[in-house]
Amino acid sequence: MGPNAGGWLEDTQASYDTVAASYADLTRHLLDETPEERAVLALFADLVRAQGGGPVADVGCGTGRITAHLCRLGVDVFGIDLSPGMIEVARRDHPGLRFDLGSMTSLALADASMAGLVGWYSLIHIPDNEISLVFAHFQRVLRPGGPLLLGFHVGDESQLMTQGYGGHPMKLYVHRRQHSQMYAWLEDAGFVVEASRTLTSAESKLGGIILARRPVADPEGRSRRCGPRMP
């Protein structure tokens, strides 16, 4: 069975339910080792505030470490994840924050209700044939002008992951993508890509970061953008 085979949602959920506690222990302090990622998250927080603030969803939040970091930066943020096990650990570790069970393929948020969205290495298990659906939901729920921050693994291959995070069994594909493919999907969904970079860190041996935005139409109906410089 290939990387786009059916049942991937169930496999992803079951895999992360299995490793949730170990995942939290192994990733809890990664941001302490990744100053460039912290700078990007701070830029995202600044952009949300510059648009007037409002709710931000950390989609595919896992055990909540990025959600909690953004909260410390003053963002009104909550997390969404497919795995009940991950949500349970997130609520345990960050009791003052909101964490909801849900899937980015059927995002249960109102249209234009989000001031920003984050997908921090959370699209890496989404098959190519489902990415357009995910980005359509992201575009739908973001307010005009709202920023979208993505982290992903850079590359060309998809690899079956059979164990991880403490040696526990897993069954899911990890998809690596090039920036050009991500740009194409985002632009097809109606986003404007404003900044990107590639880096090596504790987060990823070769990681990509993209900052995009749902554009704001000017009075004549044309979309406009303002591109920040990514740290």
Image (cartoon, rainbow, N blue to C red):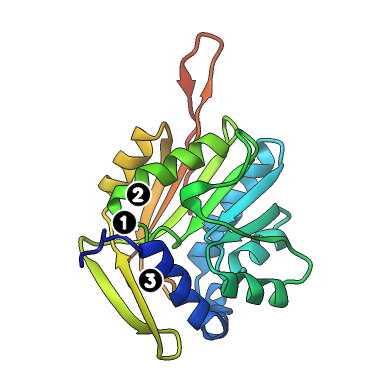
Q: Which residue is mark 3?
A: 204
Tag 2's secondary structure?
helix
229 shown above or below 145: below
x then y, percent, for residue 7: 35, 63
Q: Nearer the viewer, residue 225 or 127?
A: 127
Tell me the CA gap for discs 1 and 2.
5 Å
**Residue that appears at 61% across and 51% down:** 57
Tell me the CA gap for discs 2 and 3.
23 Å
**Residue that appears at 50% across and 63% down:** 37
Q: Which residue is mark 2?
A: 130
Q: Which residue is mark 1?
A: 127
Name which residue type carries label 1. Answer: Pro
Q: Residues within 10 Å of mark 2 (few under 14, many from 20)?
A: few
**Residue that appears at 44% across and 76% down:** 15
- 45 left or right, relative to 159: right
x then y, percent, for residue 79: 63, 59
Q: Earlier in the sequence, mark 1 or mark 3?
A: 1
- 148 left or right, relative to 156: right
x then y, percent, for residue 230: 47, 50
Quadrant of the image occupied by residue 199: bottom left
- 141 left or right, relative to 14: right
